């Protein structure tokens, strides 16, 4: 599908991407770029990539697909730095968890001739780093491609094939729609998980079982990464936290008013939503 | 350890208990009692119990340990009905998820000579019914025994051995302390999970990944069971919902005030809590 794919950033996402691309044979050659010597050594030793470099220019040279799998706030800057070294027909995309900030900043920098479309493969884990890389991380999950007035439909078509080739369900929408939806199904659950962990008393922790374990799993995610995800989607997340607080108040009100039928309705509705998933 | 153990209620908990008791050889004979003919047939056919009956009196006759594994609100009534048929030296316990309501009502009915101590094996699943019974459900989890001024320490000692024999970590505390702790680590996460599911928009659901899946898993639990758990612990749960709302407001405030350091502190604290678990 591609001759040479370069992945910038070899963490959980970048590492898993390399493994998945190799497994599905979507590239003849996979190049990794990382800021850390230990990471590129590990990536090459474990045959996660064919070769790896600390140098952005060397890394993207001659590639026909470049994927930036770095923390959200760093992506536009990396894009700007590597743009001059891209092949003319190269496709540039990313794997960031929010899209307005990234797409706006990359389009704004105005480097012409760069074929950029934002991607968000919606998969992850509370784990991080190349040590947790998993060739099946993306399988069956959804990948969103962003479309703006500047988007070239041919690039969308090629990226659809690429992510589809990793067994992802691909959807196309605006960066705005993406961020609104992701706030609801990813950033809000993360905020709730963090708040639950921070509500837990020490004595209780020793007794906690599966329910606590599962609801707080994602609170183990990398704080630095999530801080930037939250801040690049703050308007949506603030609205969604309000929605969640209202849902909690409904439960509280049912308890206070001894409204057993009302509580049962809330529990049944939630079960129906979750069972439909 | 016991000659004859009777389990009243053959759902997920009762069925799993029977399987675990058999696996650990803690009884020579295991009797099941259920209200449903289909359930007792299934329990006997699948050798989950040695025999089963629809009749409470027949079921408890001659048993030296009787465990009521029924929904919270039904437990005191079942205890009252079976009390006249218990052997003098029989131990009576339950597996209910809240303890003040159960212990108070069983002690209040005042039948003398019944050796009751409340138990709560803290294990479960969003699944229900004997079809989901699992011999390893309790392994490694915590079991709380309740102690009041009426409690006979010899019964506590025997039940410690029993639950310990199922590889559970056993703790003894008052029904009040139990309900306070469980609100924090089980009922509040359940309320949050239900509220998250009820906050989810339809469009987002199609995209949702592991974070949403895990944080809302327990919202699939049986609404009727959870309604009664919530209502028999409503004072504690109302307080804990207030705590959770305050934690959510802290995240909201950090976002609104552009307080990146503050948000990072909240994320780091939650990670530390969860990683310590």
Image (tube, coloured by chain):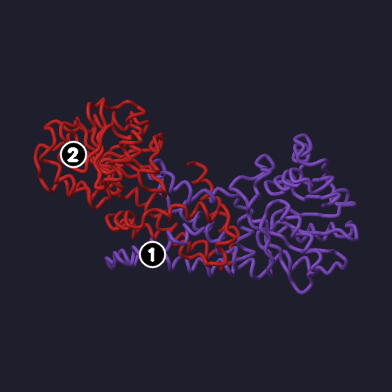
Chain colours: A purple, B red
In percent of width and height, residue B27 lies at 27, 27
Residue at 39% x, 62% y is A268
> In the rendered view, would you say A276 is above or below A28?
below
Label 2 vs label 1, nearer the camera? 1
Residue beneath disc 1: A266
Q: Quadrant of residue B263?
A: bottom right
Closer-to-camera residue (A275/A125): A275
In percent of width and height, residue B119 lies at 27, 40
* Cα distance between the residues tagged 2 and 1: 35 Å
Residue at 30% x, 41% y is B41
Residue beneath disc 2: B116
Closer-to-camera residue (A163/B184): A163
The crowd level at tag 1 (other Cα within 10 Å; few <14, some 14-19, many 20+) is many
Q: Is residue B124 left or right of residue A16?
A: left
In percent of width and height, residue A221 lies at 58, 49
What is the chain identity of the residue bearing mark 1?
A
Closer-to-camera residue (B197/B19): B19
State the SS at label 1.
Answer: helix
> In the rendered view, would you say B273 is above or below A193?
above
Q: Are marks 2 and 1 in contact (CB under 8 Å)?
A: no
Residue at 90% x, 61% y is A88
State the SS at label 2.
Answer: strand
């Amino acid at each position: 599908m591609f001759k040479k794919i370069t992945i910038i950033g070899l963490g959980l996402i970048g590492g898993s991407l390399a493994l998945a691309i190799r497994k599905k044979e979507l590239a003849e050659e996979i190049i990794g770029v990382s800021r850390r010597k230990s990471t590129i050594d590990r990536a090459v030793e474990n045959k996660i990539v064919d070769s790896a470099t600390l140098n952005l220019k060397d890394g993207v040279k001659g590639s026909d697909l470049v994927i930036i799998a770095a923390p959200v706030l760093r992506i536009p800057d990396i894009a700007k730095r590597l743009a001059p070294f891209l092949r003319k027909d190269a496709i540039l995309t990313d794997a960031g968890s929010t899209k307005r900030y990234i797409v706006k900043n990359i389009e704004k920098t105005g480097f012409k001739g760069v074929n950029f479309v934002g991607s968000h493969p919606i998969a992850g884990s509370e784990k991080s780093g190349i040590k947790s890389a998993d060739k099946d991380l993306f399988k069956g999950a959804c990948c969103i491609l962003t479309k703006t007035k500047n988007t070239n439909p041919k690039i969308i078509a090629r990226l659809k094939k690429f992510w589809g080739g990793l067994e992802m369900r691909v959807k196309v929408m605006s960066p705005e729609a993406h961020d609104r939806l992701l706030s609801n199904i990813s950033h809000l659950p993360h905020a709730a998980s963090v708040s639950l962990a921070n509500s837990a008393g020490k004595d209780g922790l020793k007794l906690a079982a599966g329910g606590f374990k599962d609801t707080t799993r994602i609170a183990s995610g990398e704080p630095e990464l999530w801080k930037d995800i939250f801040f690049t989607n703050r308007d949506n997340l603030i609205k969604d936290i309000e929605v969640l607080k209202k849902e909690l108040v409904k439960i509280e009100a049912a308890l206070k008013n001894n409204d057993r039928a009302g509580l049962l309705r809330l529990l049944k509705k939630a079960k129906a939503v979750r069972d439909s998933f």
